[in-house]
């Protein structure tokens, strides 16, 4: 395979995700783009379009949005260390005896 073909194959495998973009912001119950790009999702909130509902994030939706794939302002944050990801750690419950 030529280098160009390999680059195309790798590029198709690596999809950009809203989770990895430094321009994604959370406000109230939605995720929006700081650069002003509109997302193709409707939220479960009345009169709010062009943003992603926080409930989609909570469900773990992939959020590999088409608008992000060719975005010139996409800012990949790279690998984020576990303590800095912002996820709430759950405690293991002790079993009752």
Image (cartoon, rainbow, N blue to C red):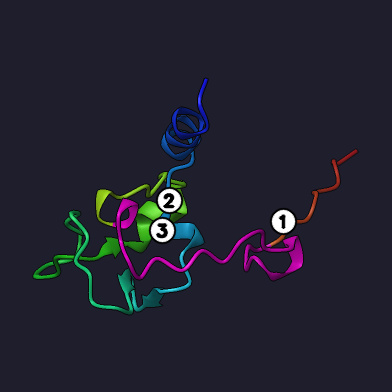
Above or below: residue 81 compared with residue 11 = below
Question: In the image shown, does 62 or 46 lie closer to the viewer?
Answer: 62
Q: Are marks 1 and 3 in contact (CB under 8 Å)?
A: no
Place of residue 43 in the rendered image (x, y in percent of width and height, measured from the top left): 21, 59
Secondary element at tag 1: loop
Q: Position of residue 16 (x, y in %)?
A: 43, 51
Start and end of the magenta stretch? 68-88
Q: Residue furthest right?
A: 97
Residue highlighted by disc 2: 16
Q: Is residue 6 left or right of residue 94?
A: left
Per the image, is 66 magenta? Answer: no
Query: What secondary structure is marked by label 2?
Result: loop
Image coordinates for residue 50, horizontal then vertical, percent: 17, 65
Ranked by sequence position, the earlier of labels 1 and 3 is: 3
> Looking at the image, how many numbered discs can be counted on the residues?
3
Q: CA distance from mark 3 to mark 2?
A: 7 Å
Residue 18, numbered label: 3
Tag on residue 70?
none
């Amino acid at each position: 395979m030529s280098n160009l073909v390999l680059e195309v194959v790798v590029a198709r495998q690596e999809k950009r995700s809203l989770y990895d973009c430094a321009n994604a912001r959370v406000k109230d119950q939605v995720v929006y783009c700081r650069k002003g790009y509109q997302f193709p999702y409707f939220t479960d909130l009345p009169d709010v379009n062009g943003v992603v509902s926080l409930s989609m994030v909570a469900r773990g939706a992939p959020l590999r949005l088409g608008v992000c794939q060719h975005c010139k302002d996409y800012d990949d944050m790279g690998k984020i260390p576990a303590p800095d990801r912002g996820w709430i750690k759950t405690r293991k419950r002790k079993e009752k005896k």
